[in-house]
Image: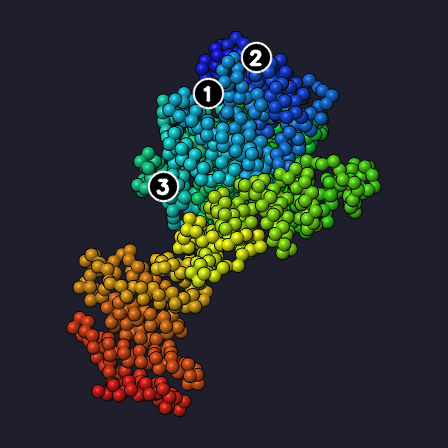
Amino acid sequence: MTPNTDILRDQTFDVLLFNLESLKDHPELSEVVKAYLEGDYKTILRNPTSQTLYGKLVETVSLSREDQDASFQDAGFQDDVSAVQVLIANVTGPPTDWGNVFPKKDNETACREQCLKSLDVDGVSVYQHIPYVQLFCLARLVFTVFFPRIIGGEFRDCRWMRVRINAYHQRLLSGLSGGSMSDFSMLQNVIEKDLKELEGEILGEKSVLGTEAKVQFLLEKAQIYIMQGLDIKARENVRLVEMVSGFSYALSGALGKKTKFQQNDISQLVVFAKSRESEEATSDELVGNLKDTTLTSGVKRSGPIALELNDDTLLESIEFAKSDKIDNSALPPELADLKPDSQPQLKPLDQITLLTEATLKDALSPLDKLNSEEILPYAVRVLSDKPTNWQIYTQALLVRSRIEAHRSRTQERSVLQLQVIVDQIIADTQEESLPGTDGVPEIRVTQFLPRAKESESAAVSERLKYIFQLNTPTRWEIETELAYAWSGVGSFVSALDIFKRLKLWAEVALCYHSIGQEDKARQIIRRQLYSSSKGPEMDLYGIDAEEVLNEKWNGELRPTPPHAPRLWCILGDLDNDPTCWDRAWTISKKRYARAQRSLGEFWTKEGDLEKARESYLAATIVNRQNNDTWSRMGDIDLRVGNWDGAVIAFQQSIMIDDTDAKTYSNLGSALLSKHAEMMKLQKAQAKGVLVPQDDDDEGEVDFSKDKKEDPKAILHQALKAYKRAASLAHDNWKIWDNVITIAGRLSPPSFPDLLLGLRSVIRIRGPSVGEAAVDADILRALVLEVTSSERPENINLAESPENNGGIYIPPRGSLARALLSMVDSEIIPLITKRAELWVLVEKLSLYERDYSNALKCAERAWRMVTGGEEWMLDAEAWKGVVGATDNLVSAYENYGPMEVDGKEVEKGWRSKARSAVKGVMGRGRDAWEGSEGWEVLEGRLEELKC
């Protein structure tokens, strides 16, 4: 059936998704629309149009996109949304027998294999045991081939469903392939293009969609970006959700107890959240709607059971202090009257927003205890709310499980909760059919809890209502996540059982490899790629059968299996054999970038940097969105002296991921090396000397001004790169040392950056190496810069010399103020043996006009120099003692007579000076009498007698 203008009423198909009620009265569509709204997808797929479309899929699944398009000239349309919803209904339950939806065909198995093959991208295959994958391919055929199309003289398209299908396709590829979303840039580009066009249609001024539809779109968009690892874009869309929906929430603190033995209330993290009450859905209406769901506070909750923590220290939940005096002044006005343990019911989409915020932080933030503490309250806020939807409640449990996996006291509940979720989903999606039907692994799981009764299970329409906004994992994805969770707690047997049941042979091999059984891992991979030399009967045995324990699987190559490029790469990793990676590259038609990355790493270790660079370059051509590949290629260019190539490679890597400190540091090194080369060329130009050329270069060096970059600008860029690296890896003192080096090489030097770098190095290294962390040369340069400049005026009267005993205090924000602060708080406490540091502190004290402290610094420096016995034997050490003594006498002469508050700094300065000189001369008489230094001391002593 072809849609016409009367049916659409000037609506786009994207708008029609949220206005299907308007088609209920249409005589030709009422039955179909009613069935769809009630979740009766069987009825829809049994109608003649659906059967025709399925026939088209069977006929054209192996054809090109153009041939498929041509076959749609007279095809129907009405099952557009149902096919993709049917696939996800199978993912989340409840069980449905789809065996009699479409007529049985002789080539049904071949059709399924062709459908799976049609989903391959760049040598990567989807999970090979997706139940009824034909339904997803049917939806993909309609929304990516049939649309866009001219229908009834009008251009018709359904971008929203195409985005959903392509994003789901991208997810199927990455979920079990060992790759990342960025490995499939073709799909990513298509999705991004449709999202931009949809944004104008849905959020634009002419949009006819309501707030709920706009929020759903933004949440889907955020989930797609989270899935793709684009955290900045994901955060932007979460912020837009707040603006569009009017939902207010904030992470704050409230007094309470977290442990059983805690005596006093301390601040605990909590999320305050409140939905906006609007005409579309008031608070009373929302509570009333809960009566229509299976998840209410008045009945037993269906869905996965929320397990208790049962810890001997931690409470099940935070016990907040019962006080009427709660300071919520820092919260937004709409949240200021909320109490942490008594918050209003949230709308379903607002609950999803909190879960999206938690998922965003958990997936794309650095893994540490502080982040985990900040993320958990988002999931807790949803779980403590009245559950309004089965799938939201399940997703909240799943998010909490993922967060709690990072803490030892909650890790047990995390794994067991995930097991309960898996058991529930498997129980709800398990069909009463023959084992092995449709090539899907038979699943029979012993559950922790009894299977839910039919009356307690949520309806299909409820489970699927927010499936795209939640981005709920598929059954096989969540089982795989459970397997990794078991392996994370050391239960490799449980993990292996799951991987084997799902027939994920690559994961099975990697699991064996992780426990040191490389021969078993190699055997499993080779079995997928090679046949047995003993004949095909060996294929009948399971991987753990005694008959195949010693089988080498060294027969002929099998026909290319699914995931073949990945299997060959794993075999190459096990054998360290570059021919395996070459074969993976070949059978993927030179599209599997992972193969070239492995080759690049191999040739780098072998020392053949030219081949390594060629491999990484090939990988970047196939996939330009992998920052690690660009970074590794930059490393090679850095090693071979290709500075321009290194700069470009590191910049490309940073554009993809700007949170990698190592890449920024390497970019700084490349720019610094480029600067050194440019300075060399400038010197050669000034001398008229021809600079040696590489073999590939022809002609003379062109020093024309329009082709020459400014070396100063390059050096400034290097400094910026190092500073960014240091800000990301603020505990890496070597990067800060590079900041100091570059800042010192600038003309004039960047003294604020010198100070910042030196202070950071002292902060990092000071606790372990003490005063050795202080670079005296850099400190001397800073002191010289401060003391040689005019003292800036301090307009703060409280810090004027008159109010501080004549001592000058530099104004806030000045270099002098920052330097004095660093010296007083971080350098002086470290000084134990280095007298030159006290000399520099003395100069700063003189700058402050703190003459008393300046004299004390000179005394301390002198004591350190004269404290040992080395100077009685070593001539250089003797010169140092003479210099320190001379400096001390000068300090007594300069500072002693000074008056502070009407009193001299040191009344007996002359006698102390003579005593110091005599003491040194007495100790060194036998060794140094008559030397040049001795004469200097005698001269100073004569001066003091005058």
Which residue is rendered at x = 48% and y = 30% of the image?
A: 195
View extreme (left): residue: 902
Amino acid identity at mark 3: Lys
- On the picture, is 74 further left or further right than 766? right
Q: Would you name the residue on which mark 1 appears? A: 15
Q: Is residue 379 above or below residue 61?
A: below
Q: For the residues carrying marks 3 and 1, which lies nearer the camera in this image?
A: 1
Give the mark, 1 or 2, whose residue is nearer the N terminus.
2
Of helix, strand and loop, which one carries label 3? Answer: loop
Q: Would you name the residue on which mark 3 appears? A: 322
The answer to whether residue 946 shows anywhere in this view is yes
The quadrant holding residue 331 is top left
Of helix, strand and loop, which one carries label 1? Answer: helix
Cα distance between the residues tagged 1 and 2: 20 Å
Pointer 3 with pointer 1, Cβ within 8 A: no
Which residue is rendered at x = 50% and y = 25% of the image?
A: 160
Label 1: few (<14), some (14–19) or many (≥20) C-alpha neighbours in 10 Å: many
User: Depth check: 380 or 899 in front?
Assistant: 899
Where in the figure is residue 53, as x and y percent of width and height? 62, 18
- On the picture, is 100 further left or further right than 682? right
Cα distance between the residues tagged 3 and 1: 48 Å
Which residue is rendered at x = 61% and y = 47% of the image?
A: 615
Of helix, strand and loop, which one carries label 2? Answer: loop
Where in the figure is residue 132, as x and y percent of width and height? 64, 26
Cα distance between the residues tagged 2 and 3: 64 Å
Where in the figure is residue 111, as x and y percent of width and height? 69, 25
User: Depth check: 819 or 739 in front?
Assistant: 739
Amino acid identity at mark 2: Met
Picture disc at residue 1 = 2
Amino acid identity at mark 1: Val
User: Depth check: 264 or 849 in front?
Assistant: 849
